[in-house]
Amino acid sequence: MTTTKPGTDRPGADDLDRRLRVVVIHGPNLNMLGQREPAVYGRETLDQINQRLTALGKQLDPPVTVHTFQSNHEGEIVDAIQQFGGASDGIVINPGAFTHYSIAVRDALSAVAKPAVEVHLSNVHARETFRHQSVTAPVVTGQVVGLGSVGYELALRFLAGHLKTTEDA
Ligand code: DQA
């Protein structure tokens, strides 16, 4: 697993083989998973989720190099989408609360124009009204909502299959 700040590393920049590269970006407060409202978000920590995704990536066909990133800061999420998303084949993103209002995050996803899956651990549609709107949803390939951390795995599996199909085409 690699976890870096924007500007310090480009995932897979020196990869000579054609492994697929997917960046998993977690937005604000997701660093507190495990302690944060466990009844809503579960007891797993972000590290445990990231480690599982990294291991899953190795097992997929084609294998996927998974790079993970988390920030509580909007500008750093924008930087990560531009830098890591731009250097990757696909993006899995849980923008956290930025989902509901960050035009900057939406514009970054739109600008890099990579296949992207938006993940929410909780069923945002069964929660407060302000969580029902996603400003990022129209610019991603699809969403996985309310399935807990399994949603990240499904997103990664989808991207591996999707990218394989588009590469073969
Ligand atoms: C979340 C849902 C958001 O409404 C919330 O602000 C989060 C987490 C989820 O994964 O369920 O931080 O994105």
Image: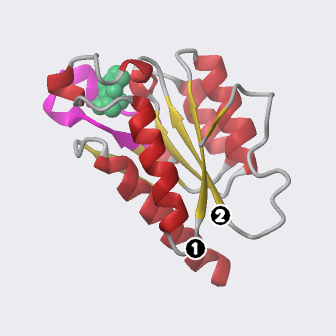
Q: Is residue 46 magenta?
A: no
Q: Which amino acid, mark 2? A: Leu
Which residue is at a point 51% across and 23% down the rendered structure image?
A: 102
Binning the other alpha carbons within 10 Å of mark 2 as few (below 14), some (14 to 19) or many (20 upward) gives many
In the displayed structure, 137 sits above or below 40; it is below
- Left or right: 9 in relation to 105: right
Q: Position of residue 130 (x, y in %)?
A: 27, 20
Which residue is at a point 14% across and 33% down the rendered structure image?
A: 126
Which quarter of the image is occupied by the N terminus? top right
Furthest residue toward bottom: 169
Q: Which amino acid, mark 1? A: Pro
Report the residue marked by disc 1.
62
Q: Position of residue 153 (x, y in %)?
A: 38, 54
Report the residue marked by disc 2.
20
SS for callout 1: loop
Q: Which residues are magenta?
A: 119-137
Asked which colour scheme the image uses, the reply is: secondary structure
In the displayed structure, 130 sits above or below 151; it is above
- Left or right: 40 in relation to 154: left
Quadrant of the rendered image containing residue 70: top right
Q: Position of residue 136 (x, y in %)?
A: 47, 37
Whichever of labels 1 and 2 marks the residue nearer the N terminus, that label is: 2
Task: Pick whichever, 134 or 46, lies toward us.
Answer: 46
The answer to whether marks 1 and 2 mark residues whose Cβ atoms lie closer than 8 Å is: yes
Find the distance from the CA under tag 1 to the CA under tag 2. 7 Å
Which residue is at a point 40% across and 26% down the rendered structure image?
A: 96
Q: Position of residue 124 (x, y in %)?
A: 23, 32
